[in-house]
Structures are given as structure tokens and as C-alpha cells.
Image (cartoon, helix red, strand yellow):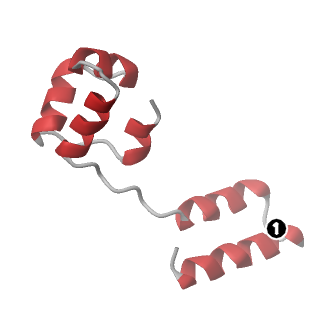
Amino acid sequence: MSEILDIAQEMARDRRKVGAIDDVTLREVEGLCMPRPRRMTPAEIRRIRTDNCASQATFAAFLGAGETTIQQWELGEKNRPDRRSVYSI
């Protein structure tokens, strides 16, 4: 996280401690301070699938996606998921 985001998050936590903001606002600030996940490459998606000995159909079922979507991800033809989505399995 960048230094500026660290400072913003620390300030929000301090304001929460003194009651200047509520828990919901603190969570919103913390969410904004999180780094955006990087999109996976087609090779990474295929590697994760094959490392788990899963067919494209099985992998799709685990992720709640269609088999065609998995094929398109692995070919780089469709917007790919972020790391958290695929690593969740």
C-alpha cells in the first residue's frame, strides 16, 4: 500500500476511535485503501486448473461459470477474473 493510503487509513481508524466516523465509514475507507487485484493471465488460469486436475467443465462448475467462459479465459478472449476469484477454489 502506498504511504498516502497508509496515512488515510490510519486517520480513519483514529477518527473511529474518537467517534467521529462510524464502523461503516471506516470499512468503506479501508476498502478504498486496498490494492486492486491484478487480472490473471490465460496461462495462470490454465495452470491452476491443470494443477488441480480439473477439466474445463469441472473448473467452470467450481467457479460457477460456464465451460465456454473458461475456454475464453484460457485463450485470452474474454475479460479474465482477478486472482481472488480463482484462488477461492
Does 51 appear above or below 53? below
Q: Where is residue 40 in the image (x, y as percent from the top left)?
A: 28, 48
Q: Where is residue 54 in the image (x, y as percent from the top left)?
A: 29, 20
Q: Position of residue 76 (x, y in %)?
A: 12, 43
The kind of secondary structure element at disc 1 is helix
Quarter where residue 9 is shown: bottom right
Quarter where residue 51 is shown: top left
Residue at x 70%, y 60% (from the top left corner): 25
Quarter where residue 24 is shown: bottom right
Does 29 appear above or below 65? below
Query: In front: 23, or 47?
Result: 47
Query: In front: 74, or 5?
Result: 74
Read off the residue under disc 1: 16
Report the label total: 1
Query: In front: 34, or 50?
Result: 50
Residue at x 31%, y 42% (from the top left corner): 81
Is residue 37 found left or right of 51 in the rendered image? right
Q: In which quarter of the image is the C terminus?
A: top left
Q: Which amino acid does label 1 sit on?
A: Arg
Residue at x 16%, y 36% (from the top left corner): 74
Is residue 79 found left or right of 17 in the rendered image? left
Residue at x 13%, y 32% (from the top left corner): 72
Q: Position of residue 15 (x, y in %)?
A: 80, 74
